[in-house]
Every structure is written in C-alpha cells, then in structure tokens.
Amino acid sequence: MMTLLLAVAAYLFGAVPFGLLVAKTQGVDIRAQGSGNIGATNVFRVVGKGWGIFTFTLDALKGFIPAFVFPRLGALVVEGYSEDWGVLFGLVAILGHTFPVYLKFKGGKGVATSAGLLLGVAPLAVGVGFLCWLATVLISRYVSLASIVAALVCAATVWVQGDKGLVVNVALTLLAVLVVWLHRANVKRLLNGTENRFGKKK
C-alpha cells in the first residue's frame, strides 16, 4: 500500500507541466511556440535563458524527489523499506512528465526529469553524462543529440561502475532506451540535416 501511494504521488508530481506554467507567467503558450514541447529546452529558446534554467531545475526535481526522498519517507513508515524503490518512483515520475494526465497525456521528453532521477540514485553517472552532454552541445550545437548521448553514457556508466545492483542498472538502461525513443523525431531530422541547432534561429 505504501509503494502504491508513493507511486501515485510520483506520477501526479511528475505530471505537473512546469514548462507550460512558467511560460504562461510570461504570457506565452509554449505549446504554440518553437518546437511546441513543454520542456526546458523550448522554454529556454522561446521565453529566455533564465526561465529555461528555472524550468529545467523544476523538471529535474520531479525526478529527484521521488527517487531520493520517497523511499526515505517509506522507511519512516515501513521498517526495512528498500531504497531501490526510488528507481521505480523516479521512472513513474518520468512517465508522468512524458504522459501527463493534466494535458491529455501529451508532455515533454523527460530529459531533465531523468537527470533528476539519476542524481537521486547514481550521482556519478549524472556527472559523466552531463560532461558528455555539454561536450556534445558545444561541438554539434544539437541539444537533442546531446540528450541522447548523455542518456546512453549514463546507462553505460552505472554498468561500468558496478556497485548499484541489477535493479538500478536495468532500470537506467530502460530509461536510456525511453529517452532515445522519445527523440525519434529528432533522430530523423538529424539524419535529414533539418534539426535545429542550439543558439541558431530559423
């Protein structure tokens, strides 16, 4: 029962469309601007750098709090409650962000929320993934490509690290697959040479 309640809370929290809400405070319907995505990258491009960073932080917290805090809340009620449940709660939050009930299940791609989950369960993988993300953005100027690279690198890092256990390793590998799948339209544009470069207006 505790796990079910925390999972539901993780989904509802993850489904909160912070990008949409932040943009609306500035009089912008982010779904009708730029790429139409409610994520931090589109807010960054359309509304401004500061608001984009703010949205990224909020979206990351949607993954971090369920992954790091929720298992510890469970341990206060149920003796011996495993921290491994944090992976499940973080994944549920990502599903909430990607398929939010508040927006008819049309949400973002979950990159920032995934980063929050990783920070909660595998901080070293986040550090390595962020460095790869930054290097890819600086070299290619493609945020989508950088996000895919970072997701794959994070998954590979936890396997190489070897101290997180099978549950975490498999979950983060599935997460990387989900991130790639959610970027399938971006992959097509990258292959066609039509993907937007970061910092370059159409």
Image: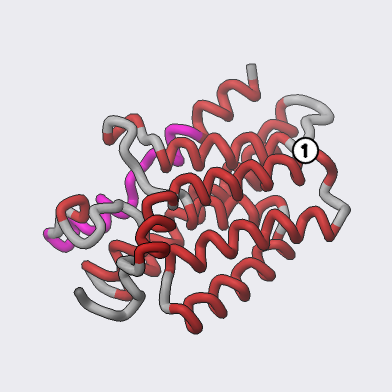
Residue extending farthest to the front is 192
Q: Nearer the viewer, residue 46 or 182?
A: 182
- Does 191 sit left or right of 126 as displayed? left
Locate residue 73: give its quadrant. Answer: top right
Locate residue 159: give its quadrant. Answer: bottom right
- Does 183 sit left or right of 133 as displayed? left
In the rendered image, the vertical position of residue 137 relative to residue 71, given as above or below: below
Where the N terminus falls, by quadrant?
top right
Question: Few, some or many C-alpha atoms within 10 Å of disc 1 (few <14, some 14-19, many ≥20)?
Answer: few
Name the residue that disc number 1 marks. Answer: 167
The type of residue carrying mark 1 is: Val
Rendering coords of residue 33 (x, y %): 17, 59
Look at the numbered disc 1 and give the secondary structure of its residue: helix
Rendering coords of residue 187 (x, y %): 43, 57
The range drawn in magenta is 11-27
Q: Is residue 9 magenta?
A: no
- Does 118 sit left or right of 21 as displayed? right
In the rendered image, the vertical position of residue 112 relative to residue 130, given as above or below: above
